[in-house]
Amino acid sequence: MPRKFEFRTFTVVALTLLFAGSAFAGDWKPLFDGKTLNGWTQKNGTAKYEVVDCTIVGTTNEGSPNSFLCTDELYGDFELKFEVKVHDKLNSGVQIRSQTKEPGKGQKYGRVNGPQVEIESTDADGEESGYIYGEATGRGWLVPDDVRIPHKHFKNGQWNKYHIIAKGNRIQTWVNGHKIADLTDEEIYKTHPKGFIGLQVHGVKKGTGPFDVAWKNICIKTLD
């Protein structure tokens, strides 16, 4: 009888620790502390990233190529939420599971590449916010043309809520509560199963700008 009691006690304790560990691993974690850019590194481009009123603001630098502020930590399967507001004349996006290519001569970081969730203002014909693009992958849009239907769920000049779930070869996105993309792509998963999160400031030509994009409430939850 005592041995059975000891076994049951051990089992309960073990299961408690197991589930406690799982719950901890799946907790929501802020990627931005609201005060500093600790945990982030700029790779590519010369856009300016700074903290303003508890937001990350990226501002264009005319003539600069695409710029990316990237997490130092890498993520595979995860759920990501953030809010974003972008200038009407600026295109932007958030990289997921991304990486850099081999740096060229004199470069510290190579070209950022991987899946990008689109951010852009709405015009008369709608826009493609929330759809998934293959940044520097040679593939262009990962969401097929016949599925990538312009919509008007993105609110110009306002904060917009994004929700992204990346699990295995499937990526799902929502903009302001509206489901936008549900992509299953084995090819991009093979080349980009894990990587950093990157905040893009799109390059602009000389004589234009400055334009800005801001992010806040950036949180991630890893998935088993």
Image (cartoon, rainbow, N blue to C red):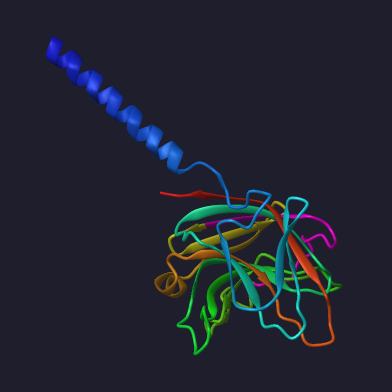
At 78% from the left and 74% from the top, the residue drawn is: 90
Q: Specify the segment rendered in magenta.
A: 148-165
Q: Is residue 21 left or right of residue 167?
A: left
Give the prevailing secondary structure in the magenta stretch.
loop
At 28% from the left and 29% from the top, the residue drawn is: 14
Is-magenta flag for residue 20? no
Q: Residue lying furthest front in this view?
A: 106
Q: Is residue 176 left or right of residue 12?
A: right
At 66% from the left and 70% from the top, the residue drawn is: 200
Task: Name the quadrant containing residue 43.
Answer: bottom right
Where is 103 relative to 58, above or below? below
**Residue 214 location (% of width, % of height):** 75, 61
Q: So how many labels did they put on this image?
A: 0
**Residue 8 location (% of width, % of height):** 22, 19
Q: Residue lying furthest top in this view?
A: 1
Where is 107 relative to 224, above or below? below
Q: Quadrant of the N terminus?
A: top left
Where is 24 relative to 14, above or below? below
At 52% from the left and 87% from the top, the residue drawn is: 106
Residue toward you, 168 or 49: 49
